[in-house]
Each structure stands twice: as C-alpha cells, then as structure tokens.
C-alpha cells in the first residue's frame, strides 16, 4: 500500500510541477528534477523519505 502511495504522490508532484513550469515559471522544473533524483536514489538505497513520512502518518 505504501509503495502505491509513494508512486502516486511522486507522479502527482511531477505532473503538478510540469504544469507550474509551463504556466507560472520554468524554475519549477527544478522541483521535477528533485523528485526524479529522489526516486532514483531510493531505487539504489531502498530508503525513501516519503515512505517514512507516510508511516508516521499511519499508512500501512
């Protein structure tokens, strides 16, 4: 369940930041890159901050 939540949140962040980059300011692409970098590092280290946050919020 947490993996699905993490993927859903990451995908939402990426899509929202792309829309913000198109309609507000191109600097929002840095947020897109940040989310992508965190996804990449979590694939190597098996550690994800969003997963820890969700667990503290009570997600199972």
Image (cartoon, rainbow, N blue to C red):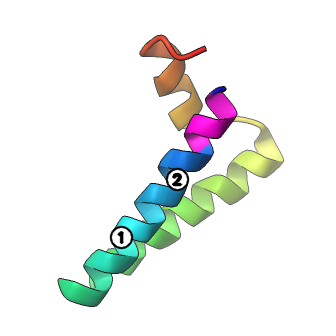
Q: Is residue 5 magenta?
A: yes
Residue 24 sits in quarter? bottom left
The foreground one among 22 and 45 is: 22
- Determine the image quadrant of residue 49: top right
Is 1 on the left-hand or right-hand side of 16?
Answer: right
Residue 13 against residue 43 in the figure, above or below: below
Quadrant including the N terminus: top right
Task: Mark yes or no: residue 57 visible.
Answer: yes
Residue that carries the numbered disc 2 in the rendered image? 10
The one of 56 and 45 positioned closer to us in this rendering: 56
Task: Please tell me which residue is depicted at 46% across the width and 14% down the height of the picture.
Answer: 56
Image coordinates for residue 27, horizontal then vertical, percent = 29, 82
Front residue of 5/49: it is: 5
| Magenta span includes 59 | no
Q: Percent position (x, y) of residue 6?
A: 58, 40
Q: Residue at x 68, y 35 (%)?
A: 3
Q: Magenta segment, which residues?
A: 2-6
| Above or below: residue 28 compared with residue 46 | below
């Amino acid at each position: 369940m947490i993996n699905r939540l993490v993927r859903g949140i990451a995908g939402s962040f990426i899509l929202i930041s792309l829309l913000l980059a198109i309609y507000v300011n191109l600097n929002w692409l840095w947020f897109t890159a940040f989310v992508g970098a965190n996804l990449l590092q979590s694939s190597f280290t098996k550690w994800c901050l969003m997963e820890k946050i969700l667990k503290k919020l009570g997600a199972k």
